[in-house]
Image (cartoon, rainbow, N blue to C red):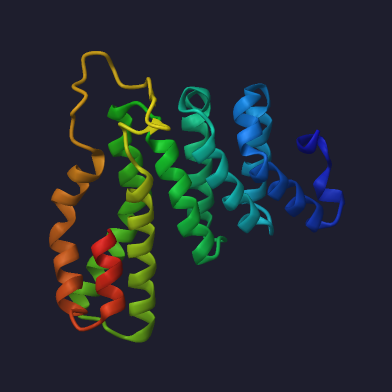
Amino acid sequence: VLNEIPYETMNEKLLGTALETMGSYSEWVNDNPKYLMSAIQLLVKGLDSTMASQATLGLKDLTSDCQPDQMIPFAEPLLEACQRSLMKGHLANPESIRLMYSIGNIMSMVAPEKIPGYLDNIISPCFKELQMFAEQQNTTDSARLRIMFCLNMISTLFSSLNTNKTKNDKKRITTMPIDQPADQPQPILMILQRTMPIFKQVCDLFINDVQVVEILCKA
């Protein structure tokens, strides 16, 4: 029902309330998966609205609370929708960072061989910015704020991306091919192998800045 309301013709706060409701009922959606598609459609609609903050909160709840086997059929379209929202550049920094947590959850459900491509598209811009600031030895206030934003984006994604993730340590995601070793390295390890020099450059540049170093250690 919430997904059928013509929000475009009504006060924007109504959409915000619907998005908050959807997030609050994420556990209920998990128990009633026939409503999952409608929930996702509503939250994706919210990402491109003035109520994006509520949409990112709702997506975080939904992708955390719903069983992976229920989310898997919607994982790639949802991941692509999140990626489009990031690319549009209309999200506030806290909204973008929060969305990265959902992206990590969703990416964990995608077939392993597709994850490197998604990772490259989503976080490469962050690493390129970090490298640019590091090479320019840019320590201005604006550069520092942007560096902290990029590091928070990366660390938030890495905190939720786990291809061996289980629901309550009981139900393993079923997208992993049968012939793939269960102990295959996590995708973030492959990324870190390529990007550690960038992290080192940033660390050297801000070695006396406790806040930057703390965020860097979380990445």
Residue 167 drawn above or below residue 187 = above
Query: Where does residue 100 sit, x and y in percent of width and height?
Result: 44, 51
Q: How many marks?
A: 0
Residue closest to the far top? 178
Residue 175's place in the image compared with 198, above or below, is above
Q: Residue at x 55, y 60 (%)?
A: 91
At 63% from the left edge and 29% from the top edge, which residue is drawn? 36
Residue 118 lies, in percent from the top left, at: 36, 40
210 lies left or right of 146: left
**Residue drawn at point x = 34 percent, y = 78 percent:** 143
Where is residue 76? Give x, y as percent.
46, 31
Q: Residue at the spot x=47%, y=22% of the render?
A: 69
Q: Is residue 181 left or right of residue 86?
A: left
Q: Which quadrant is the C terminus positioned in?
A: bottom left
* Side (left or right) of 181 relative to 89: left
- Of residue 39 and residue 121, the one placed in the foreground of this image is 39
**Quadrant of the rendered image containing residue 205:** bottom left
